Amino acid sequence: MLNDNILSNMTLNPQNFELIKFPTKKCLMVNYKSIKLSPGLYFVSTPIGSARDITLRALDILANADVLAAEDTRTLKKLLEIHGIQLKNRSLISYHDHNGSKARPRLLAHLEQGKSIAYASEAGTPLIADPGFSLLTEVLSLENNVISAPGPCALIAALTVAGLPTDRFSFEGFLPNNKSQKEIKLRGLQSYRGTLIFYESAKRLSDTLLKSVEVLGEDRQGVVCREITKKFEDTQRGSLKKLSEFYCDKNIKGEIVLLIAGATDPDVDLNKVEQHLKDALKSMSVKDSAEAVALALNVSRRDVYQLALKIKRRSE
């Protein structure tokens, strides 16, 4: 928001629409506005790399909330400083996995007083592989308002550039550290036909790729997105075997999102599918029949829908 002093000290170049500052006065431009927030808990998404990825609404909330809470107060203070937001005399409360039981009562007390609280995780969207779920459940149990200020999210950013199907996906967070538990987890996902998304640490990536090759197969396609939106952002695509070989001897750093293509359709008994559809169509619409059969037989919903249309036309 530009105040009158700033506007009086600027003009627009009509050719390229850049803001031209006259050198006579020192100007400060801010991107937030003063608003009155309703009482409640605001989950505010913050940048995962570039500080400029924050939304204007997130800045409004951070600038005007009665109380601020953060997984890492140092990170939030730096973000406020970058965007010219002053903490003033507001409380800034640390809330993370290790102090949640002690910090929650303090936050709940502020809500009981009718205050607005803005909570930010260290980076990205709160609760997505980040603290906040226990706080959310308690706030909801007390029938307080919960508001989302959506924005950056590493898994969504990675999915949009990966080149793998986006119509169906499952975010599985971090795989277990224990090798046997990691294998059990991956085997449970072998037949999932959507894109699999994991967060992973740089030091564990090579082992995770090796185990993925062993359990899911060397030809399964994968994508490794590293340092998304940051200076050294990097994306590698290929078969799990190729990715495993690429990272086996590399000393890498940074935040990582690993995406793995879903399982392909197994050999389908079309006669079985058709019989199930005929039975379903006796009491359901084409769309509902296709959805029910596809789910029951773990086959492509689109292909089943096309077959259901053919059966319906033949019966008319």
Image (cartoon, helix red, strand yellow):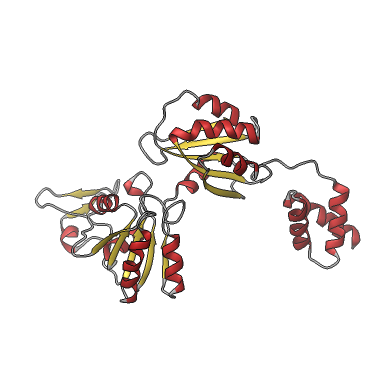
Q: Quadrant of residue 222?
A: top right
Find the residue positioned furthest to the right. Answer: 315
Q: Quadrant of the C terminus?
A: bottom right
Q: Is residue 221 above or below residue 2?
A: above
> How many discs appear?
0
In the displayed structure, does residue 294 sit left or right of residue 241?
A: right
Can residue 165 be seen at all in this image of the molecule? no
Can residue 146 be seen at all in this image of the molecule? yes
Residue in view at x 84 percent, y 57 percent: 277
Q: Quadrant of the N terminus?
A: bottom left
Query: In the rendering, at what x and y percent does residue 63 appear?
Result: 27, 62
Query: In the rendering, at what x and y percent does residue 19 appear?
Result: 24, 50
Residue in view at x 63 percent, y 32 percent: 214
Find the residue positioned furthest to the left. Answer: 24
Residue in view at x 34 percent, y 76 percent: 112
Query: In the rendering, at what x and y percent does residue 306 appear?
Result: 78, 52
Q: Is residue 62 above or below residue 206?
A: below
Q: Is residue 256 above or below residue 285?
A: above
Query: In the rendering, at what x and y percent does residue 193 appear?
Result: 67, 45
In the displayed structure, does residue 272 sit left or right of residue 116?
A: right
Residue in view at x 29 percent, y 46 percent: 15
